[in-house]
């Protein structure tokens, strides 16, 4: 992706989805009101985090914001009804529904998953709508010229354009990771949030010596967020010599990003193999950090460990703010800091630049092929117009405020909607530059499965670094082959660019030697 993170990545969505109770079966709908004879359009919406009548994390009152917005929209359009659908946030279910043409009209899906299927015609591009005015916005207000102008985090929002140059995603809110820390324990041991990675390790050692688990984190976060952050720390300075594609729509917002086709081409040049010193260094750093993490990286209740003060630091996302801010058992003040930069004194391939953004878009709304089922043509579909109108109505500041700020977890992406005080640290983090790539969204589920299982085995001492990298090289070989075949990629298009960047690479050290 040119987010990741979190996005937020699938990990964010799955973590939140798993925390909420749900009925048995694949999908459940909020019981619809009776539809009068004049109702022509029943729009099915899978809203993800904001599913009406749900109690996030079993705390507080059931959510009602979207119900209220839908009711107001239906008053404007008596021929339309909005029905909310609770669906699994897993790719297998989504793909099955889209292939059958039975998916909800509006869906919350990580856009990196959408990109995998854009060639199949399952999603409706939003560009033509975003580039026009939002008809619900008063003249002179953001959105009256272009709908685009309503979005606060412009770089992340516009950076969600797919590699085919089209925009399929509307970003309603933002999510980001951070290190939650126990201020009381930090004061007790006389430490402050770290200045750099070396200081970070020093602080963790202090807590480890005192009998704590310094860093509460699981293997999923390390595989996803950890990989993206460390990769950016070591590869960012190589971009002038290896960034082979500069999409004019995304480049101005993302300042360099490696898409799947670039990753595949670079892999063929020896990158991300045993011959790539930076690739090996990425996992060396991970393994060095592993000594401060829980013995069990898969099944420890990290929330409970943090609240019970058995660990002074917890790497989680802004979703956890809601639990910490409302939990009656919280007996200490907490704060949030971001992972610090890796200095050259710790790794010769780092240059001390700030850690990048890996979160970004949380609720990512797309229009599926169901939205045009009346005519199967975006140019003539009246049903599509109703779907777009509902999204435009949802983006009004008063409506986004009712939905996003109903619980303290995500940051509104609409101008004029306040950020809740407890989320301010994440707002600051989101102003950083975006990452270099998103490994967990580059290939397919098979790649992700092998990568995560072998990474945990490596971190736990089950295989050596060379054995692990051997597994990864075979996994990436397979992933690249699959991507090229499915997307009919012609990687030879990068040959002229690769040759033109040779002078840049000649000034860089320890690059893989490949033609």
Image (tube, helix red, strand yellow):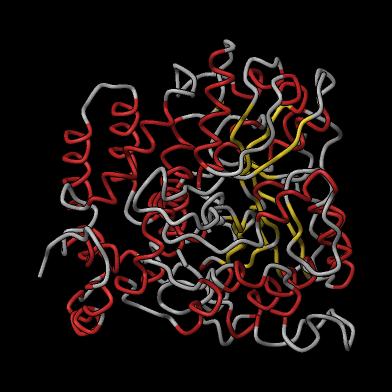
The answer to whether 173 is drawn above or below residue 313 in the figure is below
Residue at 35 percent across and 78 percent down: it is 245
Q: Is residue 300 left or right of residue 304?
A: left
The answer to whether 318 is drawn above or below residue 399 in the figure is above
Placement of the N terminus among the 4 image quadrants: bottom left
Q: Residue furthest front?
A: 345
In this rendering, the count of numbered labels is: 0
The answer to whether 441 is drawn above or below residue 159 in the figure is above
**Residue 385 position by quadrant:** bottom right
The answer to whether 266 is drawn above or below residue 316 in the figure is below
Q: Residue furthest top?
A: 211
In the rendering, at what x and y percent does residue 265 appear? 22, 67
Residue at 65 percent across and 64 percent down: it is 171
**Residue 287 position by quadrant:** top left
In the rendering, at what x and y percent does residue 382 appear? 66, 80
Residue nearest the viewer, comparing 219 with 276: 276
In the rendering, at what x and y percent does residue 229 appear? 47, 49
Placement of the C terminus among the 4 image quadrants: bottom left
Residue nearest the viewer, comparing 292 with 296: 292
Q: Is residue 399 left or right of residue 508?
A: right
Residue at 66 percent across and 54 percent down: it is 429
**Residue 214 position by quadrant:** top right
Q: Residue furthest left?
A: 515
In the rendering, at what x and y percent does residue 433 appear? 56, 64
Q: Is residue 459 left or right of residue 43?
A: left
Residue nearest the viewer, comparing 4 with 406: 4
Residue at 67 percent across and 32 percent down: it is 20
């Amino acid at each position: 992706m040119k987010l990741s993170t979190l996005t937020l990545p699938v990990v964010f969505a799955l973590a939140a989805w798993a925390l909420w109770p749900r009925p048995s079966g694949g999908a459940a709908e909020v019981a619809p009101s009776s539809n009068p004879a004049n109702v022509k359009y029943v729009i099915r919406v899978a809203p993800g985090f904001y599913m009406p009548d749900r109690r996030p994390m079993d705390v507080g009152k059931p959510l009602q914001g979207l119900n209220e917005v839908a009711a107001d929209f239906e008053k404007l359009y008596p021929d339309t009804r909005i029905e909310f659908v609770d669906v699994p946030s897993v790719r297998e279910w989504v793909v099955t529904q889209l292939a059958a043409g039975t998916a909800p009209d509006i869906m919350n899906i990580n856009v990196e998953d959408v990109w995998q299927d854009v060639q199949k015609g399952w999603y409706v591009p939003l560009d033509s709508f975003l580039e026009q005015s939002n008809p619900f916005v008063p003249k002179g207000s953001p959105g009256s010229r272009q709908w685009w102008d309503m979005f606060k985090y412009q770089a992340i929002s516009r950076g969600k354009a797919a590699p085919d140059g089209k925009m399929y995603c509307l970003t309603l809110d933002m999510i980001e990771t951070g290190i939650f820390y126990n201020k009381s324990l930090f004061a007790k041991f006389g430490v402050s949030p770290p200045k750099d990675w070396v200081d970070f390790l020093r602080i963790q050692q202090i807590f480890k010596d005192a009998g704590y688990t310094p860093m509460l984190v699981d293997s999923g976060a390390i595989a996803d967020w950890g990989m993206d952050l460390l990769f950016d720390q070591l590869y960012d300075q190589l971009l002038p010599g290896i960034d082979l594609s500069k999409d004019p729509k995304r480049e101005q917002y993302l300042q360099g990003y490696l898409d799947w086709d670039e990753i595949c081409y670079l892999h063929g040049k020896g990158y991300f193999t045993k011959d790539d010193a930076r690739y090996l260094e990425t996992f060396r750093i991970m393994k060095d950090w592993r000594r401060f993490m829980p013995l069990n990286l898969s099944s420890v209740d990290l929330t409970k460990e943090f609240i019970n003060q058995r660990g002074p630091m917890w790497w989680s996302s802004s979703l956890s703010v809601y639990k910490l801010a409302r939990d009656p058992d919280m007996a200490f003040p907490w704060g949030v800091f971001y992972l610090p930069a890796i200095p050259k004194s710790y790794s010769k391939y780092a240059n001390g630049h700030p850690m990048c953004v890996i979160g970004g878009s949380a609720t990512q709304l797309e229009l599926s092929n169901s939205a045009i089922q009346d005519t199967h043509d975006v140019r003539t579909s009246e049903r599509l117009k109703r779907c777009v109108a509902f999204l435009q109505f949802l983006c009004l500041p008063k409506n986004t405020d009712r939905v996003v700020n109903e619980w303290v977890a995500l940051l509104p992406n609409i101008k004029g909607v306040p950020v809740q005080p407890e989320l301010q640290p994440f707002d600051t983090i989101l102003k950083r530059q975006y990452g270099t790539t998103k490994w967990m969204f580059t290939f397919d589920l098979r790649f992700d499965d092998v990568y995560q299982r072998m990474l945990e085995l490596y971190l736990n001492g089950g295989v050596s670094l060379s054995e692990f990298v051997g597994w990864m090289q075979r996994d990436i070989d397979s992933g690249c082959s699959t991507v090229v075949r499915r997307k009919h990629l012609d990687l030879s298009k990068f040959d002229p660019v690769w040759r033109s960047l040779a002078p840049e690479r000649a000034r860089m050290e320890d690059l893989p030697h490949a033609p």
